[in-house]
């Protein structure tokens, strides 16, 4: 009797699990948006995998060389949205040569020919030619609603004009930080204004594209649904008509308080008009005389970016204390500990905080030598409990400050800390116990970056990172560890880690290979700086099916020191790359 009851329960379980009609199953899956959950669903059985394939609307391909467009189409023939990344993140910091690769051409050709439902395309860190855009427009102009060329290069403004003329259903055009040729030609903005009435987002922030105030005003007048406008440098006094016309605008970035080739003139911006719907703002080169432009609108702001301003610590404080409803704040470390204390006291709704280093390369901006230490970190941790994203550059830090983050910032899913090399003396090293407390407390953490200096995180600390990074999927570590034992300790944990980046750690080839094998979820490994083996072949210990290993040559003119050597290893169903430049040497597959 007991056996019959168990058989009956098993049959009932199969009916409940697999007897769901396809229509109902597809509807249920439509509410599952998290890609990790969708992946888990697709592993239940072949039937569920097929339903997932037909109902999946969006896919992110984190590495363009990890698969082929043909294989992706066979797996997900009904895709409506695709995000595709190519060059490693290191390319953003000029650590990889420009000829590394990342051409979008093979993907564009296949997407245009076979992905019949594709409406949204996001390309990140890729080379996109004018011919690529022409092919895409010919095939998808009638249905494309979103085109994002994010930190891309290789195309020109005539291609943007083609997009503007042809894609009349386009709601989002995103070009931020892309390198675009013929930048003085702004006819594409006029084409967009006269051919599109449904545009909601236009972003060419941090590009060198010219934009005339007349064409921008025409755009906001004709695109009544425009909510986000992020532009390049454009003199703010020339944009007054734009803002009086753009009554639906919710986010603006760009502009400038410096007029090219003109002598600086003090102007009164106290009565400058912004539409009441505007809640997110980033202004370029704003100084003491212009900061009054924010005061009438500060209480309504939800996002404020002050990274590209000429403000000192006290002026940051004056602005922030008027912004109690901020949810996102981006600044440079000139804000100082004093400014972060004001943030903690004022911005109780803050969810995202980014503090970049002050001696940056953004147009030669000068700061007041602001410094962030454990004082500011502890203040924010205690005062802003809703933080989910926190990236910060500090000049000093202690274990107690990191412990405060773990104690009070329980909602963090992304935490990144860089310890700058400005100060000779750091109050407390190593930071092993602080990192342990942070990771134990921040159980929702999925992305973790810790870029410090030698001695700040020992082998023991790396063991803590492995033990307590249960949910972390992306990790960047810089100048950590003392020996190969550190990376071995880390690799015994981190069960969810898929992407690992190491810089300046100088582990041996053999240790890196063993760690790659030990980290069962690892899909991507980038390393700059490691100890080469005498024969240079110890990396081959990580060889396994579908695992590409590439050596990146930073300097082809002479011998390369250990601290500059780079390797990139990643899972790929596409096999060895066929477009390797001289600076990329495939180690496996070798042919």
Image: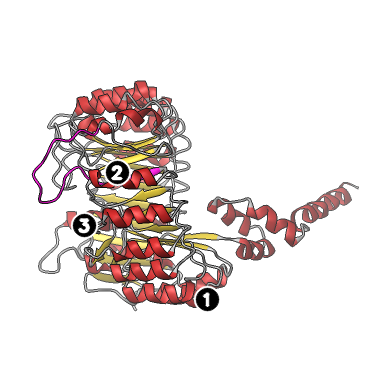
Q: Which residue is mark 1?
A: 114
Residue 77: image x %, image y %? 57, 70
Residues shaded magenta: 251-269
Task: First in sequence, mark 3 or 2: give its number.
Answer: 3
Q: Which mark is residue 473?
A: none
Q: Is residue 50 visible?
A: yes
**Callout 3 crowding tier (Cα within 10 Å): few <14, some 14–19, many ≥20:** few
**Callout 1 crowding tier (Cα within 10 Å): few <14, some 14–19, many ≥20:** some
Q: SS class of the residue under badge 2?
A: helix
Q: Would you say residue 255 sits in the magenta stretch?
A: yes
The Cα atoms of the two marked residues, 3 and 1, are separated by: 35 Å
* Figure quadrant of the C terminus: bottom left
* Residue at 49% over, 63% down: 169
Q: Which residue is mark 2?
A: 240
- Which label sits in the foreground, 3 or 1? 1
Q: Is residue 560 left or right of residue 484?
A: left
Q: Which quadrant holds residue 421?
A: top left
Query: Residue farthest to the right?
Result: 1
Q: Which residue is mark 3?
A: 94
Residue 20: image x %, image y %? 76, 57
* Residue at 34% over, 68% down: 161
Residue 464: image x %, image y %? 38, 36
């Amino acid at each position: 009797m007991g056996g019959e009851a168990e058989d009956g329960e098993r049959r009932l379980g199969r009916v409940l699990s697999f007897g769901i009609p396809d229509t109902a199953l597809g509807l249920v899956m439509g509410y599952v948006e998290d890609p990790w959950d969708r992946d888990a669903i697709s592993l239940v059985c072949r039937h569920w995998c097929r339903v997932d394939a037909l109902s999946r609307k969006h896919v992110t391909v984190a590495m363009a060389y990890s698969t082929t467009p043909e294989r992706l189409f066979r797996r997900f023939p009904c895709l409506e949205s695709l995000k595709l990344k190519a060059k490693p993140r290191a390319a953003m910091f000029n650590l990889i040569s420009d000829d590394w690769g990342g051409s979008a051409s093979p993907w564009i050709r296949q997407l245009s020919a076979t992905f019949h439902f594709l409406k949204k395309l996001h390309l990140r860190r890729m080379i996109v030619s004018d011919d690529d855009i022409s092919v895409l427009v010919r095939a998808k102009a009638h249905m494309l609603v979103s085109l994002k060329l994010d930190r891309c290069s290789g195309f020109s403004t005539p291609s943007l004009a083609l997009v503007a003329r042809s894609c009349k259903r386009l709601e989002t055009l995103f070009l931020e930080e892309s390198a675009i040729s013929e930048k003085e030609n702004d006819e594409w903005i006029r084409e967009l204004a006269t051919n599109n009435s449904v545009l909601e987002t236009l972003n060419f922030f941090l590009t060198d594209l010219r934009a005339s105030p007349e064409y921008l005003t025409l755009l906001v007048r004709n695109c009544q649904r425009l909510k986000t406008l992020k532009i390049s440098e454009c003199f703010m006094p020339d944009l007054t008509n734009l803002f009086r016309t753009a009554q639906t605008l919710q986010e603006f970035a760009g502009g400038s308080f410096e007029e090219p080739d003109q002598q600086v003139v003090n102007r009164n911006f106290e009565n400058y008009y912004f539409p009441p719907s505007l809640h997110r703002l980033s202004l370029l080169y704003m100084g003491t005389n212009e900061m009054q432009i924010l005061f009438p609108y500060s209480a309504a702001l939800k996002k404020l970016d002050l990274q590209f301003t000429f403000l000192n610590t006290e002026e940051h404080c004056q602005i922030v204390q008027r912004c109690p409803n901020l949810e996102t704040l981006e600044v440079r470390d000139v804000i100082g500990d004093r400014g972060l204390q004001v943030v903690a006291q004022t911005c109780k709704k803050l969810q995202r905080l980014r503090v970049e280093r002050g001696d940056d390369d953004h147009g030669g901006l000068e700061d007041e030598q602001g410094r962030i230490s454990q004082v500011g970190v502890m203040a924010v941790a205690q005062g802003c409990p809703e933080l989910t994203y926190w990236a910060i550059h500090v000049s000093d830090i202690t274990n107690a400050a990191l412990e405060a983050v773990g104690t009070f910032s329980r909602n963090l899913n992304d935490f990144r800390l860089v310890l700058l090399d400005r100060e000779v003396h750091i109050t407390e090293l190593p930071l092993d116990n602080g990192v342990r407390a942070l990771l134990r407390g921040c159980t929702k953490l999925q992305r973790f970056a810790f870029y410090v200096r030698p001695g700040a995180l020992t082998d023991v600390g790396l063991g803590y990172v492995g033990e307590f990074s249960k949910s972390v999927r992306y990790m960047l570590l810089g100048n950590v560890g003392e020996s190969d034992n550190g990376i071995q300790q880390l690799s015994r944990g981190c069960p969810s880690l898929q992407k690992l980046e190491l810089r300046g750690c100088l582990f041996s080839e053999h240790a890196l290979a063993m760690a790659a094998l030990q980290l069962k979820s690892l899909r991507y490994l980038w390393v700059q700086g490691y100890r080469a083996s005498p024969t240079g072949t110890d990396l081959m210990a990580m060889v396994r099916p579908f695992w590409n290993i590439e050596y990146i040559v930073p300097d082809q003119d002479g011998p390369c020191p250990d601290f500059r050597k780079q390797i990139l290893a990643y899972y790929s169903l596409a096999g060895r790359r066929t477009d390797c430049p001289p600076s990329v040497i495939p180690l496996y597959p070798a042919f």
